[in-house]
Every structure is written in C-alpha cells, then in structure tokens.
Image: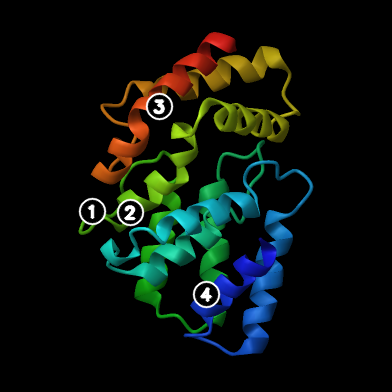
C-alpha cells in the first residue's frame, strides 16, 4: 500500500516540482499519517479515498486540487483538538507553497479541507467538494463488519476519554448525521451508500 501511495503522490507532485522535493514531502506525509495514535485517520483511509476516486475522476473539474485536499485533509489529527481541519489547511498551504502551486489553487484546496470539519459544502460551482465529502464518509455505508471495525478504530483514537464521556459525544455526532436529509451529496454515493449508512449509524447508536 505504501508503495502505491508514494507512486500516486509522485504522479501528482511531479507536475509541480522535482524528485527531491517530491520525496521530502512524501516522507512528511507518511510520518504524519503513521504516527502511533492513528488507528483510522491513517494511510489506509487515504488509500481508500484515492482508490474510489479512480472510478469517477473524469467527473472532477480540478482533479489535482481534489487530490491535494485528500492527501492533506487529516495531516493534523489529534482527538483532543477541535481545530484539526484548520491546522491541516494551514499545514497544507505551507507545503504547497514549497511546490510553487499558485495561490488561487491553494485557497481552493484549503477551503476543501476545512469543509470536512462539519461536512458541509464550502464550494458549489461544481461537484468537486461534494465528492470529497462523500469519499470521506464512504466508510459509513460499508458492510456492518467493516463499519464495526471502523468504530473500533475511532474508539482507539479517542481512548483518552472514558465511556461516560465518549459514548454521549459519539451518539450526538451520529444523530446529527441521521437528522440530515441525506448523508451524501452526490447521486452516485446516495445510491450506493445512503441506505446502508443509515442502518449502520442506527445500529451503532443502539450498541453505545
């Protein structure tokens, strides 16, 4: 997996920079996403998103911007912090400036990253933002065993919190998703994942 991801990263960044800087930025990404407290928000999460993206990349208006947003949307992740997305966006900005990416594209990428905080669209001139959010939450619509494994990984990331604090907080988040008219923004993901995702969320709430 790591080899595939590094190859994908190189294909993306070599449009903007040289092999040396591509390697430096890859190692930086790898180090962040493999830190010891990453049980779900890790390289496997990125790999899953990027693999799914292959199926509809022709629908994306700015594919490179979307890919950079995927790579950096969880670069900073601490379960005790409430500004991970903002920090990730700022970290991304610094990294992409070293790659000589223009400011307009960087601002677009930052907006995409920050939209994952509340999973609400920040950019709606095309479906790029919608696809990013749907990719990020595609795990919710997986089969129950995969979803159960996901919930266990999330619990490990929040292990600092006892059940008496974690369970009510988790229920609140899940119920907020269920209150939405739809968990997903694109017809492709609604059709594929919506029904199963709602069943999974309800089942998890019952088990908490």
Residue with the most extreme top position = 206
Residue identified by numbered label 4: 96
Q: Reading the chain from its start, which is encountered first: label 3 or label 4? A: 4
**Which residue has dot 3 on it?**
196
Secondary structure found at label 2: helix
Q: Are marks 4 and 1 in contact (CB under 8 Å)?
A: no
Residue 70 picture location, percent across and down: 49, 58
Asked whether, in this view, residue 44 is left or right of residue 58, the answer is right
Q: Residue at x 47, y 33 (%)?
A: 140
Q: Give the quarter of the image for residue 10.
A: bottom right
Between residue 169 and residue 3, name the one nearer to us: 3
- Residue at disc 3, secondary structure: helix
Q: Earlier in the sequence, mark 1 or mark 2?
A: 1
Circle 1 crowding by C-alpha within 10 Å: few under 14, some 14–19, many from 20:
few
* Mark 2: few/some/many CA within 10 Å (<14, 14-19, 20+): many
Q: Which residue is mark 1?
A: 124
Q: What is the CA distance from the residue labelled 4 to the residue labelled 1?
A: 23 Å
Q: CA distance from mark 3 to mark 1?
A: 26 Å
* Label 2 or label 4, whichever comes before in sequence order: 4
Q: Quadrant of residue 138?
A: top left
Residue 149: x and y in percent read 64, 31
């Amino acid at each position: 997996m790591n080899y595939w991801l590094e190859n994908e990263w190189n294909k993306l960044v070599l449009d903007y920079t040289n092999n040396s800087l591509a390697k430096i930025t890859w190692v930086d990404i790898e180090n962040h996403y493999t830190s010891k407290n990453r049980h779900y928000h890790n390289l496997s999460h990125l790999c899953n998103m990027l693999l799914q993206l292959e199926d509809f990349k022709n629908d994306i208006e700015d594919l490179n911007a979307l890919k950079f947003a995927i790579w950096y949307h969880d670069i900073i992740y601490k379960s005790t912090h409430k500004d991970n997305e903002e920090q990730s966006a700022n970290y991304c900005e610094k990294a992409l400036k070293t790659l000589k990416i223009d400011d307009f594209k960087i601002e677009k990428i930052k907006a995409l990253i920050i939209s994952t905080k509340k999973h609400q669209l920040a950019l709606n001139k095309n479906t790029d933002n919608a696809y990013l959010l749907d990719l990020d939450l595609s795990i919710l619509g997986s089969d129950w065993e995969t979803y159960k494994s996901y919930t266990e990984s999330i619990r490990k990331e929040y292990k600092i919190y006892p059940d008496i604090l974690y369970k009510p907080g988790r229920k609140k988040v899940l119920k907020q998703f269920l209150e939405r008219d739809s968990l997903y923004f694109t017809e492709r993901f609604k059709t594929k994942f919506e029904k199963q995702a709602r069943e999974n969320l309800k089942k998890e709430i019952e088990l908490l």
